Image: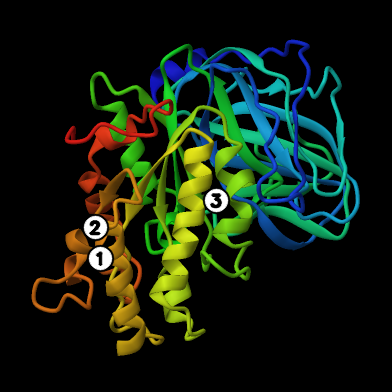
């Protein structure tokens, strides 16, 4: 965490919370936006996380991308079938483990109230917090769930250790009460900041590779994390926010591990504030599942995502599907579909730019396999080096989308 993050001030001001559309709303429904200058600084797409528990505190650890003022959190009951009561919520700077930096933990409010009740399917922003949240801050968002039941909403594979305990311990900066470690983010699906004019964000829409599987836990080494560090280290880059919308096992066309990319696009991508560009990197789970998905069906799914993103004023960078020979579900038929899909991504002109991850990570000796130096060991998921290679291969200029024209400038790295 950067030393400047110690200057974060997060006293509460009384401004209205923003409510978003439920998860079961029509996929084309638009979410009510937060203020124009808000930019998403962190996100983790929600899914069902088993049975919700009452009288429980969660201390959720995350790292910001964009810096700014007026931080808001977005809490989700997207998959709940009964009301969710968050009795209190706090935001602080993580020191180590569940311990916070002294004096950093401040109370969050929702429409001026210290608690909030979310109806089934509801998503809501907190009131903004004055003061600045720095780039690369390790935040600890503490939520006390007073009453809950039925399906819990959250992100299952965080690859980040967070903490839980019985009772309300959200205001505490010490870590004594937080004796339980958890590997998921519960009820929290986005954080945004006011960056001022001229700054935007990119959302990475994907599956377990984007979610970071096979990258090192607690080190923020997913490929979107590497991308965020590249953006912050590039003078003149106006894209600073990076939101990770990966869900392990996710598919473009079918629900299963999370709702399909088509179904969740509005909630997990287009509703996030400040988004200019979507990196679309899904398809391997559709192909390898032996469900009979054809290249024509998959590319039609891509077209629907691209069209909806363009209609919302976003650009789309299409990422080619990685090779996976050696994975238990590989077969020549599925690989033929993958290669046909990749050729479409490269040549169809449907996307505004291409991130050719397949070309970067495949073996030159066998293009159906990952290069061993990038293979996380299961022949499907890249390791930390592979994650960095993917992020390094993206032309940063492709993310600087001009939403009015629906085109992104090319060539800048």
Between disc 2 and disc 3, the foreground one is 2
Q: Position of residue 189 (x, y in %)?
A: 63, 42
The answer to whether the residue labelled 2 contacts the one labelled 3, judged by CB atoms less than 8 Å apart, is no
Seen in the picture, residue 7 relative to 329 is either above or below; the reply is above
Q: Secondary structure at mark 1?
A: helix
N-term mark: 3 or 1 = 3
Q: Quadrant of the C terminus?
A: top left
**Number of marks in the rendered image:** 3
Q: Quadrant of the N terminus?
A: top left
Q: Which mark is residue 211?
A: none
Residue that protrudes farthest toward the left in the picture: 365
* Alpha-carbon span between mark 3 and mark 1: 39 Å
Q: Which mark is residue 347?
A: 2
Front residue of 100 and 84: 84
Q: Residue at x 17, y 35 (%)?
A: 411
Name the residue that disc number 1 marks.
343
Label 3 neighbour load within 10 Å: few <14, some 14-19, many 20+: some
Q: Position of residue 221 (x, y in %)?
A: 36, 49
Q: Secondary structure at mark 2?
A: helix
Q: Position of residue 125 (x, y in %)?
A: 71, 29
- Colour scheme used in the picture? rainbow
Name the residue that disc number 3 marks.
161
Q: Residue at x 43, y 78 (%)?
A: 294
Q: Residue at x 51, y 84 (%)?
A: 291
Q: Secondary structure at mark 3?
A: loop
Q: Position of residue 260 (x, y in %)?
A: 59, 62
Seen in the picture, residue 115 relative to 310 is either above or below; the reply is above
The answer to whether the residue labelled 2 contacts the one labelled 1, judged by CB atoms less than 8 Å apart, is yes
N-term mark: 2 or 3 = 3
Q: Residue at x 70, y 42 (%)?
A: 29
* Alpha-carbon span between mark 2 and mark 1: 6 Å
Locate residue 356 relative to residue 58 in the image: left or right: left
């Amino acid at each position: 965490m950067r030393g400047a993050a110690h200057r974060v001030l997060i006293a509460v001001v009384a401004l209205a919370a923003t409510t978003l559309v439920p998860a079961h709303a029509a996929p084309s429904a638009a979410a009510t936006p937060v203020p124009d200058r808000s930019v998403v600084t962190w996100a983790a797409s929600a899914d069902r996380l088993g049975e919700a528990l009452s009288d429980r505190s969660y201390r959720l650890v995350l790292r910001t991308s964009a810096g700014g003022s007026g931080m808001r959190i977005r809490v989700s009951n997207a998959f709940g079938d009964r009301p969710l009561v968050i009795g209190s919520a706090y935001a602080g700077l993580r020191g180590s483990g569940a311990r916070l930096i002294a004096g950093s933990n401040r109370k969050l409010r929702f429409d001026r109230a210290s608690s909030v009740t979310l109806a089934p399917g509801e998503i809501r922003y907190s009131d903004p917090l004055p003061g600045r949240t720095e780039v690369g801050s390790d935040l600890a968002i503490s939520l006390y769930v007073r009453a809950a039941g039925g399906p819990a909403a959250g992100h299952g594979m965080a690859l980040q250790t967070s903490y839980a305990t019985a009772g309300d311990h959200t205001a505490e900066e010490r870590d004594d009460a937080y004796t339980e470690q958890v590997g998921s983010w519960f009820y929290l699906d986005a954080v945004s900041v006011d960056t001022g004019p001229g700054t935007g964000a990119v959302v990475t829409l994907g599956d377990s590779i984007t979610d970071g599987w096979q990258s090192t836990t607690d080190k923020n080494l997913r490929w979107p994390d590497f991308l965020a560090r590249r953006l912050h280290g590039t003078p003149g880059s106006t894209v600073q926010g990076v939101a990770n919308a990966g869900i392990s096992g996710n598919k473009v066309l079918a629900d299963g591990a999370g709702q399909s990319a088509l179904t969740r696009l509005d909630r997990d991508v287009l509703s996030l504030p400040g988004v200019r560009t979507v990196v679309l990197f899904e398809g391997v789970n559709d192909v390898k599942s032996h469900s009979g998905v054809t290249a024509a069906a998959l590319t039609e799914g891509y077209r629907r995502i691209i069209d909806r993103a363009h209609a919302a004023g976003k650009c789309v960078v299409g990422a080619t599907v990685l090779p996976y020979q050696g994975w238990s579900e590989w077969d020549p038929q599925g690989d033929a579909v993958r290669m046909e899909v990749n050729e479409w991504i490269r040549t169809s002109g449907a996307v505004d730019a291409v991130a050719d991850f397949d070309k970067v990570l495949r073996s030159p000796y066998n293009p159906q396999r990952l290069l061993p130096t990038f293979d996380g060991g299961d022949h499907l998921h890249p390791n930390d080096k592979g994650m960095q290679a993917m992020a390094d291969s993206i032309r940063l200029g492709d993310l600087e989308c001009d939403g009015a024209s629906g085109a992104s400038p090319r060539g800048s790295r």
